Amino acid sequence: MNYQNPILPGFHPDPSFCRGEDRYYMVTSSFEYFPGLPLFESVDLVNWQPIGHCITRESQMTFTDALPNALGIYAPTIRRIKGRYYVVCTNVGTSDHGPGNFFLWADDPHGEWSDPIWLDLPGIDPSLLEDDQGQIWYCGAHQGIYLCQLDLTDGSHGPRIDIWQGTGGADPEGPHIYQKDGWYYLLIAEGGTGYGHMVTIARSREITGPYEACPANPLLTNRSLPLPIQGTGHADLMEDENGNWWAVCLGIRPLEEFPKRHILGRETFLVPVTWQQEWPDFGVNGSVLPEMAGPLPGNPSAVDLQQKAYDFFDDFSKASLATAWNTLCRPRDNQLMPTAKGLAMVVSREEKLSGQTWLGHRLQHLPFEITATFDLSEASAGLNCGLNLFLNPTHRYDLVVEKTATGNLVKATFAMGPFGREEEFFTFKETMASLRIKGDTKTVIFEALNPAGEWQKLTEVPLHYLTTETGGIFTGPYVGLFARGEKETAGKVYCRSFHYHGRFDF
């Protein structure tokens, strides 16, 4: 059965998946965004539905707002052990609850996840294995790949055992160990999470080693190949209910220009895996392609697997905030409140990272069209609100309505590293403002509903200042709703509605 990649478009890096009773579950990195650790569910490995997040409470964890950004939640692993679901992960940087490695658990992935159990173990990219004897092993990356025995009741662990340094590529990381046919297979990423990324594997009869590298390494990479998908790596393996094997990995889709740049962040791809002579074969000759084929579980139809247009409308009357939206670093319940009038956005000066009350939805499609309507009837003079494309605090495009003494001013501000500019367009008296941002692989267009009730094109800017190579690190762009003001409290605005329409043309 043919299917389309990526299976999770937009900023969804470092995927890990596992098999449940009758479903599959997947988590990805989320860095500084809250709630953290987005969780997805599927029956066929291609169509994934968001069901929530593993980190949903400030009592569990908050993330640093120090600069540069792209700290926080790195490279989770999800596993089902003795009927319970575990996610083991790393919080990078400082926070209210400390940096380091931790795990969470839940008996039902749809429910609340536990508070973290912090681990006195170094490095990043932790993984778990329950071996055939029921022993739990922790595997991580710190000056090479190491493992130790782990107690899932209290986080205590045995001595560290160094097991592999990889094949010589930069940054050996992202380890996972699997047990199959009397062998322990150690899968890792090498080459750095960029255009040289690759997946390598080694095996041993004993989990503690010694490990022999596969003679065909790297088993998965798109480096130096003229393919539309690049940077493939950081893979996780799984056997489905039919005995077929699959891998998920991250990758990027550069724009068709030189030098190479990508806009949507690191995305999640699905790769069929077969076993030949006791070693796995990944994808098509070790490559990830936009269209691939394999014996998918769940008996999906061809229609089910077609990439359709994405259409998301939110009037904030439902519980969409739990799955579709993120804030920065911590929850903002006192600043973002669903009401009968829409989403109330209360201005606070406590936002260090963005300088504003902000709520974001991942940008996942090219082309896209985003429309939002705001109610400024309770706003004070000096308050701004609007719609933006947000990569990080220094690379963002803002379409703004500013309440002034003479009316509401529509303007645009652009931050491109140390450079920026502002454009003013028109003023109107009404309390309702409708804004629109449209984009494709080349440009972004700002529009607003003018006093004549017509959509007016305001300005057009190139997209590439929001690419990772130009202004980012590990995250990808969001579409954001924001409110801000010069005073400590400048009233509130309401976002009455938000509409995101995207297509899978890219």
Image (tube, helix red, strand yellow):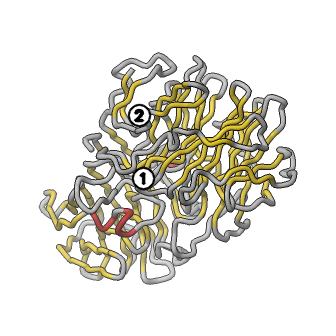
As drawn, is 391 to the left or to the right of 112?
A: left
- Closest to the observer, 397 or 183: 183
Is tag 2's residue or tag 1's residue first in the polypeptide sequence? 2
Q: Amino acid at mark 1?
A: Arg
As drawn, is 98 to the left or to the right of 401?
A: right
**Residue 235 quadrant:** top right
- Closest to the observer, 431 or 288: 288
What's the distance in space between the residues labelled 2 and 1, CA to CA? 32 Å
Mark number for residue 362? 1
Residue 16 image point, x, y percent: 58, 42
Residue 438 image point, x, y percent: 24, 55
Quarter of the image with the N terminus in it: top left
Q: Residue at x 34, y 32 (%)?
A: 291
Q: Residues within 10 Å of mark 1 (few under 14, many from 20)?
A: many
Read off the residue under disc 2. Answer: 285
Q: Is residue 422 above or below residue 280?
A: below
Q: Residue furthest front?
A: 215
Q: Residue at x 39, y 72 (%)?
A: 379
- Closest to the observer, 33 or 416: 416
